[in-house]
């Protein structure tokens, strides 16, 4: 459970994926994906299966099954705990209904691992307007989580989550489409990792510092807004861009910029390239090294709450397979995507280097992300 | 109160305008948007996974409407 308080956000977000293209139900398709993340001493891989099928002309059902197999020897784990392995399973079911130019979507998701359980229910509605040039969507999700702790049977804490969101997509010109999204998420309950610790100066310790458990506020509210655009170039290729602004009640402010380029070659190949920049400030109660034990009410040393910047380069290729002559399969593709991410932390130090506390080198690492998948339309 | 009145006026004008707006991009001019390379999210299962890679390692979250959501874990 490297970062349990964020896992259910994925469930909230998954349910939002379907209503983006209102007035047209998504294609019938199946995807089988293998994912792998390697970086910072952590390896996570596993499969994801997604099937979507229309019926009775106005309904579409979808099902997703996802597995994470985690092997972690991250800097947090090797400095304050022991390397571990675990598995997380997640299942989601969705139903979309089209009624004229209005699309309704409901979904249920469940995620389970040995020390964390998450359940989420979502509802979204979208409507096409102005001759289908504009699409407006509204959504709400509610999540119920349960946090547990290995080795402590008495430990059991709830988390309540809510997400409110608004989206707008607009065809601006025959070649330009733009979108706007806004989302507020609130959490209430046990929001920190029960295993993670903060460090503080301790003259009695041989290393000069010692550890105590993290303490987070029991509530968090965040607001995020994004603006995106996609442009069709004169020679059949697409440029895309996105900016996202983020702020929350913990004092984190973040900015994200993403650029992408999609280039088909012939009738079978599509190549993609992209760059993503991310930058955030630290939470108000974050510190790499507190002056003393119990220095303040709330204490965090989770590097994801620190000040840092990341850069990501992406490459991807899609190949449309020749027809197999199967009548039920209209077309199929094989896809490979690779991302290289660089994380540089401004106030999280690598304590493995030793030396005077607070003067260790700043931490940073590279991650490799692979997605290999086969898609079929039927 | 003033803000609420202004909001009501905006909503009224917007609602009144719904029926009268002439689409400035005609249906026959929209073939570019039917091209798969212009899809907001060509591969939902893949995008969902990548979004969760970000959410698990970054403080920011939400407003990912343009390219689906995240399913997956880290």
Image: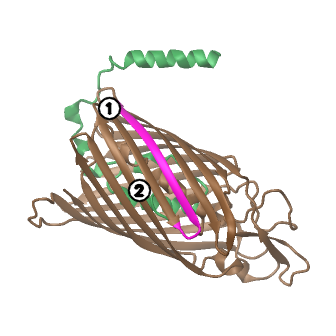
- State the residue at coordinates (22%, 46%): A55
**Can you give x and y, in whole percent of width and height, for residue A138 in the image?**
45, 36
A124 is higher (above) or lower (below) than A299: above
* Vertical comparison of A284 with A170: above or below: below
Highlighted range, magenta:
A113-128
Residue in front for this viewpoint, A206 or A65: A65
- Rendered image quadrant of residue A338: bottom left
In the image, residue A300 lies in the stretch drawn in magenta: no
Look at mark 2 in the image and give the residue it sits on.
A92
Q: Which mark is residue A133?
A: 1
Q: Is residue A248 left or right of residue A16?
A: right
Q: Earlier in the sequence, mark 2 or mark 1?
A: 2
Q: Residue at x 54, y 68 (%)?
A: A342
Residue farthest along the right direction in this orientation: A204
Q: Residue A265's spot in the image, x, y percent?
A: 22, 61
Query: How does the figure colour the protein chain or chains?
Result: by chain
Q: Decide: few, some or many residues near mark 1? Use Cα within 10 Å; few <14, some 14-19, many ≥20.
A: many
* Left or right of A175 in this view: A160: right
Q: Residue B55: image x %, image y %? A: 54, 58
Q: Position of residue A31 (x, y in %)?
A: 30, 62
At 34% across and 56% down in the image, what residue appears? A63
Label 1 sits on a secondary structure element that is loop
Colour chosen for chain A: brown
Q: Main secondary structure of the magenta part?
A: strand
For the N terminus of chain B, the quadrant is top right
Chain letter for the green part: B
Q: A323 or B31, which is in the foreground?
A: A323
């Amino acid at each position: 459970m490297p970062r349990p308080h964020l896992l259910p956000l994925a469930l909230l977000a998954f349910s939002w994926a379907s209503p983006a293209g209102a007035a047209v139900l998504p294609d019938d398709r199946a995807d089988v994906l293998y994912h792998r993340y390697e970086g910072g001493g952590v390896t996570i891989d596993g499969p994801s299966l997604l099937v979507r099928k229309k019926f009775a002309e106005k309904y579409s059902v979808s099902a997703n099954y996802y597995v994470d197999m985690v092997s972690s020897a991250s800097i947090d784990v090797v400095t304050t705990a022991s390397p571990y392995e675990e598995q997380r399973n997640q299942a989601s079911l969705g139903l979309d209904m089209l009624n004229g130019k209005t699309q309704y979507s409901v979904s249920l998701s469940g995620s389970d691992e040995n020390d964390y359980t998450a359940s989420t229910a979502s509802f979204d509605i979208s409507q096409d307007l102005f001759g289908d040039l504009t699409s407006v969507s509204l959504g709400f999700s509610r999540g119920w989580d349960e946090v547990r702790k290995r080795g402590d049977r008495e430990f059991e804490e709830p988390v309540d989550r809510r997400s409110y969101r608004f989206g707008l997509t607009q065809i601006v010109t025959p070649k330009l489409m733009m979108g706007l999204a806004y989302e507020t998420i609130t959490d209430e309950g046990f929001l920190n990792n029960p295993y993670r610790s903060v460090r503080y100066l301790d003259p009695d310790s041989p290393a000069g510092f010692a550890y105590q458990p993290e303490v987070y506020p029991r509530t968090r509210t965040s607001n995020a807004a994004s603006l995106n655009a996609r442009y069709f170039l004169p020679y059949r290729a697409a440029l895309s861009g996105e900016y996202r602004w983020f702020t929350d009640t913990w004092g984190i402010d973040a900015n994200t910029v993403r650029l992408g380029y999609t280039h088909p070659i012939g009738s079978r190949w599509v190549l993609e390239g992209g760059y993503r920049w991310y930058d955030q400030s630290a939470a108000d109660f974050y510190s790499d090294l507190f002056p003393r034990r119990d220095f303040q009410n709330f204490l965090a040393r989770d590097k994801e709450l620190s000040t840092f910047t990341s850069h990501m380069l992406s490459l991807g290729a899609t190949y449309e397979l020749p027809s197999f002559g199967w009548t039920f399969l209209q077309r199929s593709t094989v896809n490979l995507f690779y991302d290289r991410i660089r994380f540089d932390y401004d106030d999280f130090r690598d304590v493995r280097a030793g030396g005077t506390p607070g003067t260790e080198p700043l931490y940073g690492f590279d991650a490799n992300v692979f997605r290999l998948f086969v898609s079929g339309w039927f | 109160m003033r803000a609420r009145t202004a909001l009501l006026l905006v909503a009224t004008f917007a609602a009144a305008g719904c029926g009268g707006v002439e689409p400035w991009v005609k249906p026959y001019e929209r073939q570019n948007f039917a091209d798969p390379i212009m899809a907001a999210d060509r591969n939902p299962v893949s995008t969902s996974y990548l979004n969760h890679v970000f959410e698990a390692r970054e403080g920011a979250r939400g407003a990912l409407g343009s390219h689906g959501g995240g399913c997956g874990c880290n």
